Image (tube, rainbow, N blue to C red):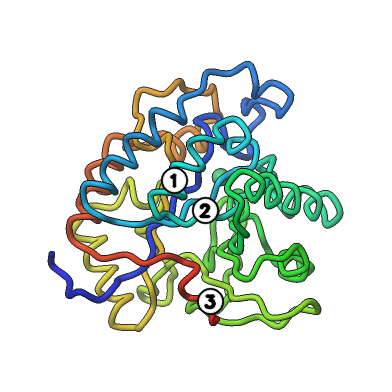
């Protein structure tokens, strides 16, 4: 281990299928999902194996639809000591969906998962980190649905979602339904620009020395490294959707690098669960 015994942050997995990509006309519609090839079980087995071997516990944001399809896997995940949190039910962008429909989706996702594991789900992450300055109601609805923390803010410019002037460190937000802890995605400031090396496509294109430097910078600044991956990213052979060029690049670039980077992260750093950041 290059780090001390102290946890460096939180390893998170957005548990969804290979076709749960956003913002492109080629992405299959909800009504067609049932007929598509399921690759989640074997991909999760790969992730479980490495977490098990390295004794790392992760926070898993399960998409309600995927949980409903794989209830035994959700229970296996909980039994292994990973935290089960919610990624909504239908993988919708908050700013596209609008308040009422989004509210129903996050409540439904929570209930589906709670019914499977028989435990309360307190954490939420929105599809595509899809909260923006256009969704001022977002935190109110998350807290009103019964979640105690949220990890949906990407505090930098990005394709979808992103709130560029958002606070970088975890902090409490007062909503009309009580306090909500927000744990934003990790970004660091370099020459006044906010950048990420810590999840999805950012993790895939960043070389390990850069990720290592970024994590040590976060540590010096007293912020947790919030890492995120998707099951499809440990499965470079998954089918490709005919996405538009920019979305294709972001979704498929360097897929072979996620698994070795996950191994490197697990071998070198200690991670805690997101729920442990919530004040009891
Ligand atoms: Zn997602």
Residue most extreme to the right: 100
Give the residue displayed 83% in from the left and 57% down from the top: 99
Q: Callout 2: 10 Å neighbours few (<14), some, many (20+)?
A: many
For the residue labelled by badge 1, is the local secondary structure a helix, a strand or a loop?
A: helix
Counting residues from the start of the chain, the first of labels 2 and 1 encountered is: 1
Q: Callout 1: 10 Å neighbours few (<14), some, many (20+)?
A: many
Q: Callout 3: 10 Å neighbours few (<14), some, many (20+)?
A: some
What residue did someone put label 3 on? 278
Residue 90 image offset from top left, x and y in percent: 69, 40
What residue did someone put label 1 on? 77
Residue 61 image offset from top left, x and y in percent: 53, 51
What residue did someone put label 2 on? 84
Establish if 201 lies above or below 16: below
Instruction: Measure the C-alpha gap from mark 2 to mark 1.
Output: 8 Å
Would you say the residues marked 2 and 1 are in contact, meaning their CB atoms lie under 8 Å apart?
yes
Residue most extreme to the left: 1
Q: Nearer the viewer, residue 211 or 80?
A: 80
Would you say the residues marked 3 and 2 are in contact, meaning their CB atoms lie under 8 Å apart?
no
Instruction: Measure the C-alpha gap from mark 3 to mark 1.
Output: 21 Å
Q: Nearer the viewer, residue 160 or 172?
A: 172
Counting residues from the start of the chain, the first of labels 3 and 2 encountered is: 2
Image quadrant in which you'd find residue 64: top right
Establish if 234 lies above or below 142: above
For the residue labelled by badge 3, is the local secondary structure a helix, a strand or a loop?
A: loop
Give the residue displayed 36% in from the left and 30% down from the top: 235
């Amino acid at each position: 281990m290059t780090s001390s015994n102290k946890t460096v942050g939180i390893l998170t997995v957005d548990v969804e299928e290979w076709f749960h990509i956003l913002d492109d006309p080629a992405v299959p519609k909800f009504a067609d999902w049932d007929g598509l090839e399921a690759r989640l079980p074997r991909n999760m087995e790969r992730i479980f194996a490495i977490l098990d071997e390295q004794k790392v516990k992760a926070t898993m944001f399960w998409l309600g639809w995927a949980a409903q399809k794989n209830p035994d896997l959700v229970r296996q995940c909980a039994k292994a000591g990973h935290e089960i949190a919610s990624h909504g039910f239908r993988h919708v962008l908050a700013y596209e969906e609008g308040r009422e429909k989004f509210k129903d989706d996050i409540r439904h996702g929570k209930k589906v998962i709670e019914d499977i594991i028989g435990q309360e789900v307190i954490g939420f992450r929105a599809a595509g980190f899809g909260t923006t300055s256009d969704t001022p109601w977002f935190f109110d609805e998350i807290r009103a649905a019964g979640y105690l923390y949220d990890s949906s803010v990407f505090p930098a410019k990005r394709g979808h979602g992103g709130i560029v002037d958002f606070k970088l460190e975890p902090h409490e937000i007062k909503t009309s339904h009580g306090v909500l802890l927000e744990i934003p995605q990790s970004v660091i400031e370099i020459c006044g620009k906010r950048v990420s090396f810590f999840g999805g496509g950012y993790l895939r294109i960043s070389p390990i020395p850069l990720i290592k430097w970024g994590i040590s910078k976060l540590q010096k600044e007293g912020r947790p490294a919030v890492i995120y991956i998707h099951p499809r990213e440990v499965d470079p052979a998954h089918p490709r959707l005919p996405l538009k060029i920019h979305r294709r690049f972001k979704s498929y670039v360097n897929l072979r690098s996620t698994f070795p980077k996950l191994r490197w992260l697990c071998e070198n750093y200690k991670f805690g669960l997101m729920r442990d950041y919530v004040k009891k």
